[in-house]
Amino acid sequence: MKRTSVMMILVAFMMYSAYGQDKEITGLLNDLLSDNWYVVSQAKEKLENMEGESIPGLVSMLQDKTIKKLTHTGDLIYPGAERFFGHGQIIDYDIDRIDVRAGWLLEELTFQNFGFTGVHIQSDYLTDYIRFNFPKFYNNSRNRKLIDDASEMEKRNMIRDLSTSEAEKWWEARDGEWTRLEALIEALKSEDEKRQAKALFYIRNGKTKCTGLNRESYKSEIEKTIVLLSKSPLKRISEQSKLILLDTDFDWLSVKPSSD
């Protein structure tokens, strides 16, 4: 009888904990929809710290095509900014758009490159962006005709839809199996400059959680790749890698939450 009671209490506790966690994620995703940059930035950090638990909600948010113009942005530099102060945080995404805002956080969290940065690039480069980032789509003759006949806005919407599709297909293929540490290692070993740059920037400056990232995992699974990247002909990749290698005191690790 006592054993049955203990099991019932344990199950109830687990259900309550899961409910509380779901409720927390729902609240943070709602904050991510805010027009207040301070609220959005705080929600982003907390959702990143929840790692894989945040991904399903972010993927669902990619279907939200509304625009929420940000306020209280201070010296934030991003495509929707109306004033530039010559300094400040730079975000290369049109985060006034909710689907792109979700895509921004999804790419930051997973170190993937689904294509969301291309939504706001100069109009002259839109066709080439589709060509190089979505070659399978571009190389279809019927799609090529659509691209050639498309207006600037239609091409931007095309990039948004293609990026969303890439993200959704990626998550479906994961089947819920994902860790941020494995994603970090995968990005560093990829041949995608944007993914490598995101991963290197996170190692040097990231202040959010990556479970399992510590001195031991860095030495055994990451350091050799960083050494190889330090010899890259791409300056932003080689310089970031060299700075990581020079940090023998692991100061970059000390600014991150405990990951174990």
Image (spheres, rainbow, N blue to C red):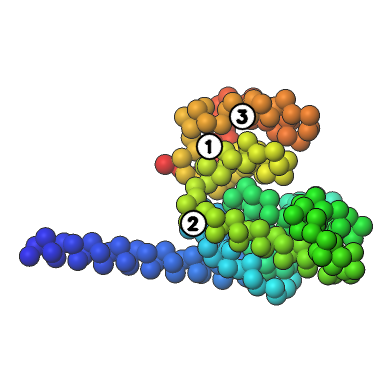
Give how far apart the Cα atoms at labels 1 and 2 are: 32 Å
Q: Residue at x 68, y 29 (%)?
A: 229
- Label 1 SS: helix
Give the label, 2 or 3, closer to the camera. 2
Q: Hey, what amino acid is under mark 3?
A: Thr
Q: Quadrant of residue 223?
A: top right
Position in image of residue 143 (x %, y %):
81, 64
Position in image of residue 204 (x %, y %):
63, 37
Left or right for 240, reference 140: left
157 or 121, which lies in front? 157
Give how far apart the Cα atoms at labels 3 and 1 are: 21 Å
Give how far apart the Cα atoms at labels 2 and 3 are: 27 Å
- Is the residue marked by circle 1 packed among few (<14), some (14-19), or many (20+) residues within 10 Å? few
> Where 16 falls versus 127 (above or below)?
below
**Residue 233 visible in the picture:** yes
- Label 3 SS: helix
- Label 2 SS: loop
223 or 132, which lies in front? 132
The disc, 3 or 1, on the residue closer to the chain's N-terminal end is: 3
In which quadrant of the rendered image does the N terminus lie? bottom left
Q: Which residue is mark 3?
A: 225
- Is the residue marked by circle 3 packed among few (<14), some (14-19), or many (20+) residues within 10 Å? some
Q: Which residue is mark 2?
A: 175
What mark, if any, has residue 254 been given in the picture? 1
In which quadrant of the rendered image does the C terminus lie? top left
Left or right for 156, reference 100: right
Position in image of residue 175 (x %, y %):
49, 56
